[in-house]
Amino acid sequence: MTYPTPVCHVMMKMLDHPGANKHDKAHFVKVHSYARSIGLMEGLDADTQQTLEVAALVHDIACPLCREKYGKAPGVLQEQEGPALALALLEDVDMPRAAKDRAAWLVGHHHTVDPVDGIDHRILLEADFLVNADEGNKSMENILSVRESIFRTESGTAMLDAIYGTGPQGR
């Protein structure tokens, strides 16, 4: 099959990824949606936007392996195992090597909140939290704490506020 963009190619590869369950697939699609929207609203250039979207799709690529190898998939293990898996998946995707390397770096740091290295890293953190807050039934106290400590983009913060009523007007 021919894909119109590298993002479409990666989406299909991840939907067919061995070991990924329905939750895994729904999770990365949701993170991608938020990351894509935040990136577009923040005005990322086309190359950074594409790399961000690819990273959002593959950010949890290590979860099936971690569950099999360790019996669990905490963030530290995802960051440890994920970059090599991401690079392997991206091998035949038509995008520059530097973009593949950056996407793999983002996979290896998608739970690392300090230091944040670039707007793409910041957006991936925000998009992943938007999904994890809902999936993990995070408390309002946790959501407010993360709003103050991690969220920095105007768009990501506006999304968080719209979903959870966490802005000054919603408190």
Image (cartoon, helix red, strand yellow):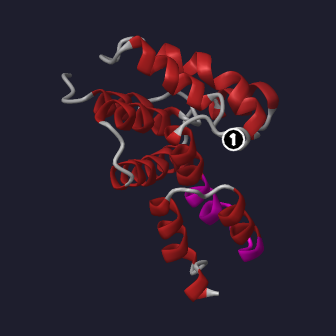
Q: Residues within 10 Å of mark 1 (few under 14, many from 20)?
A: some
Q: Is residue 162 above or below residue 38?
A: below
Residue 122 position, x and y percent, is 57, 45
Left or right relative to 2: residue 109:
right
Instruction: Tell me which residue sits at (44%, 54%) in the image.
Output: 34
Quadrant for the N terminus in the image: top left
Residue 153 position, x and y percent, is 51, 56
Q: Given the image, on which type of amino acid does mark 1 rest?
A: His
Q: Which residue is mark 1?
A: 111
Residue 72 position, x and y percent, is 78, 38
Q: Per the image, is 132 magenta?
A: yes
Q: Is residue 141 above or below residue 3?
A: below
Residue sticking out furthest to the right: 70
Q: Per the image, is 93 magenta?
A: no
Depth check: 76 or 52 in front? Answer: 52
Quadrant for the C terminus in the image: bottom right
Q: Is residue 101 above or below residue 163?
A: above
- The rendered magenta stretch, by its main secondary structure, is classed as helix
Residue 16 position, x and y percent, is 42, 31
Depth check: 77 or 68 in front? Answer: 77
Q: Is residue 138 above or below residue 93?
A: below
Instruction: Tell me which residue sits at (71%, 58%) in the image.
Output: 149
Whether residue 98 is visible to the viewer of this picture, yes or no, is yes
Residue segment shown in magenta: 129-141
